[in-house]
Amino acid sequence: MARPLAKRFWRALPSASLIGALLISSVEAASPGARALYGSSRSNPAFLVAPDPNKSSRTIGWELGQEYFRPVPLTIPSAIVSGESTTRLIPEFLTWYSFPEVLRLLQLGSPLLRFTREDYRTGLSQAKLDQLLTWNDHLIGVLPSWSTSRYRQYLSQLDSLERVIGSNDFTRVLMNRTAVEHLLRQWLFSDHCLDRNGDDLDDVFWTPSQPCLTGEFPIGSAIAKLNWTPIQEYAPFVGYRTMESEFRASSLPNNAEWDSFSVQVAAPRADQIIVGSWLPGNRLGLTGVHFMLKNQKDWTWSSFWWSPENHSSLNQDQPVTFTRLFPQAPNYSQCTVTADQDSAHSQPTWCSNPYLEKGPGNIRTNCIGCHQFAGAHTSQSKILEQNHTRLIRQNFPSDYVWSYSDGSFSWVRQLLPVFELHPIERYPSTTVR
């Protein structure tokens, strides 16, 4: 049913429309081919479970890691690859949705939905969300730029696991279906984030902010931030020394940074690091991935990063259930926090990723201390200057998600062209917390 709806939209679009041409070119990077291969990303029931207070944060981190990195089989049809069909296994989070893909949904798919006044008031219904996401799974032969022959050619290039992993353009931010449905459900209100008065920077730590969301992300939402590093066979590779005893917020200087713990090592082999590639000779290793999971009010925060052999103690407690997930697992370390304080010792918790948390002071973070200010119109550098590791805010404008409202590549900034195509009547959003 989704395909006829999509075709009706394209017939209705003027053939000479400059807007249509711009939309087609702007969504090329979102790869409808990759989504057709991955299929719909489904929500994981394990993400609905609140962290067990009787388990250590590290145990929780490894258990969540088993869900994030769970291998998903992708079958490339035998009609495309010579010989029998080929099945490749990739980590589940790599099949999640990117901002460019969700933007394509709104740019090209929203005319199918015929928004009503009720949509503007309350957000999109589940039925419309399902229709939109189902349409997104079947764009081959529907989008002018993705014909069946192009898709066949695309699949023929997936001749290795590295090519399959690299097929979705090494996107930096990925979201599971639950998080995406929340963005889509209330996207009509997102421009509140662009022109709100915001906080006085001097008082940002204490004063409330005008919210930009119509409510918190629902339980089960998950967002990943990735770092990919080029791998050159004979070039040195930067790793980091991560010994647990050295990384506690209370024991690190205020201006400490990860560069002080960097080490140069040989370029990792394919059996030591998850590798993606697309262009010949262009190989990238997954050096860091940071997950935020809404399984409680203030989220659960887990970071995984590649570690050189014998340079980390933060992978020594890796359970065999995680180690067996993929060949490179033993080289990945992790940290996890479920609260801003260690209840047993009344000390700030710690979790920082050497490939993602750059700059003076960022090595001391526990994620919560910084992310609590997301959407509050302040800078991360200002937050780091004041060394915030405690949860002090009572109001969370974008529910801890920096990429939602802050920065030139934020979700609401990318929505600007869509707002221009769909002028909307303003309605006040409700307070988040």
Image (cartoon, helix red, strand yellow):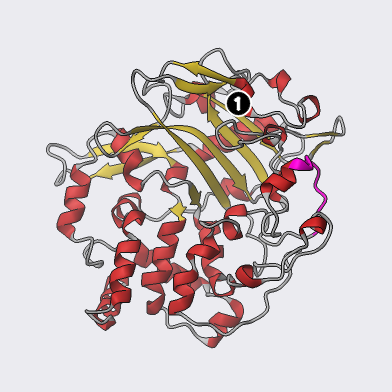
User: Percent from the top left, x then y, of residue 184?
Assistant: 51, 67
Query: x, y (%) of residue 185?
Result: 54, 70
The residue at the point 54 percent across, 18 percent down is: 263
Q: Main secondary structure of the magenta part?
A: loop
* Relative to 399, 109 lies left or right: left
Residue under the image location 68 percent in, 79 percent down? 428
Compared with 142, 329 (above or below) is above
Query: In the rendered structure, which segment of residues is drawn in magenta?
Result: 385-394
Tell me if mark 1 has few (under 14), some (14-19) or many (20+) residues whose alpha carbon lies within 10 angstroms of its own. Answer: some
Q: Is residue 308 above or below residue 322?
A: above
Of the 4 image quadrants, the one containing the N terminus is: bottom left
User: Image quadrant of residue 433?
Assistant: bottom right
**Is 378 situated above or below 424?**
above
What amino acid is found at the position of numbered circle 1 in the picture?
Answer: Asp
Tag 1 residue: 259
Q: Quadrant of residue 179?
A: bottom right
Please report the residue visible at 54 percent of the width from the left and 30 percent of the height from the top. 305
Q: Residue furthest top?
A: 310
Provide the secondary structure element on which disc 1 rests. Answer: helix
Closer to the camera, 100 or 316?
A: 100
Observer able to see residue 339? no
Res 172 seen here: yes
